[in-house]
Amino acid sequence: MSTNNDNAAAAVIAFVSGAVIGAAAALLLAPAPGREIRGKLTDLGETAAERVRRLAREAKFRASSKTKGADYEYDGGDAWI
């Protein structure tokens, strides 16, 4: 089960990194003055950093335990769920 999750995560990371590299290459190869391109790359880097922070917060929230402190253990009794 975790192998599927690992593969999915690797695929998402590969896709995002490819998109970032492609966007940077497009900006560098576009016919525009250097100052303009540097400004675009700076904005792109700031936007990407903000997205990474947001996605990291979301991942941390989803990975955290939803039942803080409530450990459910089987005590050996007969109970219907």
Image: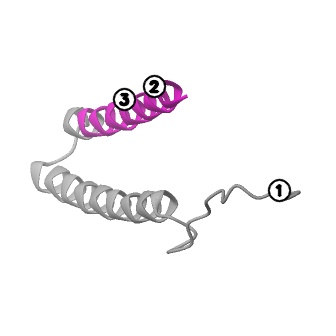
* For residue 45, side relative to residue 12 (left or right): left
Q: Which residue is mark 1?
A: 78
Sooner in the amino-acid sequence: mark 3 or mark 1: 3
Sooner in the amino-acid sequence: mark 2 or mark 3: 2
Q: Amino acid at mark 1?
A: Asp
Does 17 lie within the magenta span? yes
Q: Amino acid at mark 3?
A: Ala
Q: Main secondary structure of the magenta part?
A: helix
The stretch of residues the image draws in magenta is 1-25
Residue 78, quarter of the rendered image? bottom right
Comparing 58 with 68, the one in front is 68
Q: Amino acid at mark 2?
A: Asn
* CB within 8 Å, label 2 to label 3: no
Q: The residue tagged with tag 2: helix, strand or loop?
A: helix
Q: Which residue is mark 3?
A: 14
Specify few, some or many for label 2: CA neighbours under 10 Å numbering under 14, 14-19, or 20 or more: few
Sooner in the amino-acid sequence: mark 1 or mark 2: 2
Comparing 79 with 71, the one in front is 79
Work out which residue is located at the far left of the displayed protein and give it. Answer: 34
Q: Residue at x 15, y 48 (%)?
A: 33
Q: Which label lies toward us, 3 or 1? A: 1
Q: Residue at x 49, y 31 (%)?
A: 2
* For residue 15, side relative to residue 29 (left or right): right
Comparing 60 with 41, the one in front is 60
Q: Which residue is mark 2?
A: 7
